[in-house]
Amino acid sequence: MEICRKGEALQISDLDPFLAELLRQIPASTNSEGAPGAEARLFSRPSAEKEICVEWKSYVEPELRRLFRSSTETVAEDLAQLNGNEKSLRNRSLTIPFEHADAWLNALNQARLVIVEKYKFSDEELNDHDRSPIGSRRDLSLFQVNFYGFLQEFILREMQCS
Amino acid sequence: MSAVSAVQLEKGSTVEAPVRETDTRDQEELDVPWQVVVHNDPVNLMTYVTMVFQRVFGYPREKAERHMLEVHHKGRSILWCGVRERAEFYVQQLHGYLLLATLEKIV
């Protein structure tokens, strides 16, 4: 896989089917339904004061939900480039318009936070970048968190350069 | 003087007269200041947190990095102090970036 800036876009090329599938999983991975811990992390309490929290839930939380949904939809639209059967995914490229960079950062962050909450990864696991090959669903999810983090780092670096 | 007196309007019907308040405030009440606190979490990237502080508070990179490192090493950092409405606005922005942030009354 190669990732680089091309004009007003970020281009991920030479994508093998495995990494392409991980990318396609971003929108689904942001779904916190059925995971109260993940929901609580995405919509964390703004204060220890009950009155503030009640108002927040009524007025601010719906805005945040709209923002998160909008980011995920933008990413899903970009990922439509990868639609197709597995064979056609071989060495495919993905072009991300630079104006979508914020949406990607947000959706990748949502996905990482939700996965970490669902699997309750410890700090040690999250910092273990030399983990042995993927042998379980848990290993795969940790790899997913790190892969999405790598993409975030690249997008951030390009944003700072521009 | 009685606070409430009854005024007879017509036969068999009465209405309460308006109350005149005589108490006055003898002290100015100042708004209690609030602070915006960001808490550590193991998922958000350090570069991402720095970028968010620059964007939300307009801090220069060095100051944003100092706060990010304080969050990382001490578990929390106070990013801003002032009136409640502004503090709420900042916390909303920070939650939009998925940072763990709270507003706290300064006691």
Image (tube, rainbow, N blue to C red):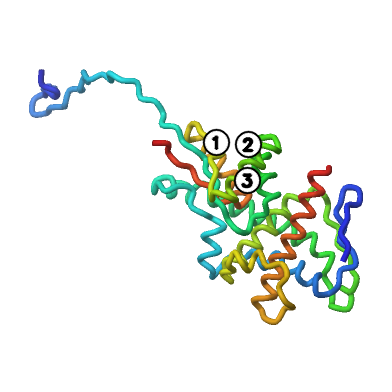
Q: CA distance from mark 1 to mark 3?
A: 13 Å
Circle 2/circle 1 CB separation < 8 Å:
yes
A16 shown above or below B10: below
Q: Are marks 1 and 3 on the same chain?
A: yes
- State the residue in front, A89 or B94: B94
The amino acid type, in three-letter code, at marker 2 is Phe
Image quadrant holding the C terminus of chain B, namely: top left
Q: Residue at x 12, y 27 (%)?
A: B14
Residue A118, position in %: x, y?
57, 70
B57 shown above or below B3: below
Pinpoint the chain carrying mark 3.
Answer: B
Q: Nearer the viewer, mark 1 or mark 3?
A: 3
Q: Residue at x 63, y 45 (%)?
A: B68
The amino acid type, in three-letter code, at marker 1 is Trp
The residue indicated by pointer 2 is B57
Mark positioned earlier in the residue sequence (2 or 3): 2
Residue B16, position in %: x, y?
16, 26
The amino acid type, in three-letter code, at marker 3 is Met
**Label 3 SS:** helix
Q: CA distance from mark 2 to mark 1?
A: 8 Å
Q: Are marks 2 and 3 on the same chain?
A: yes
The residue indicated by pointer 1 is B80
The residue indicated by pointer 3 is B68
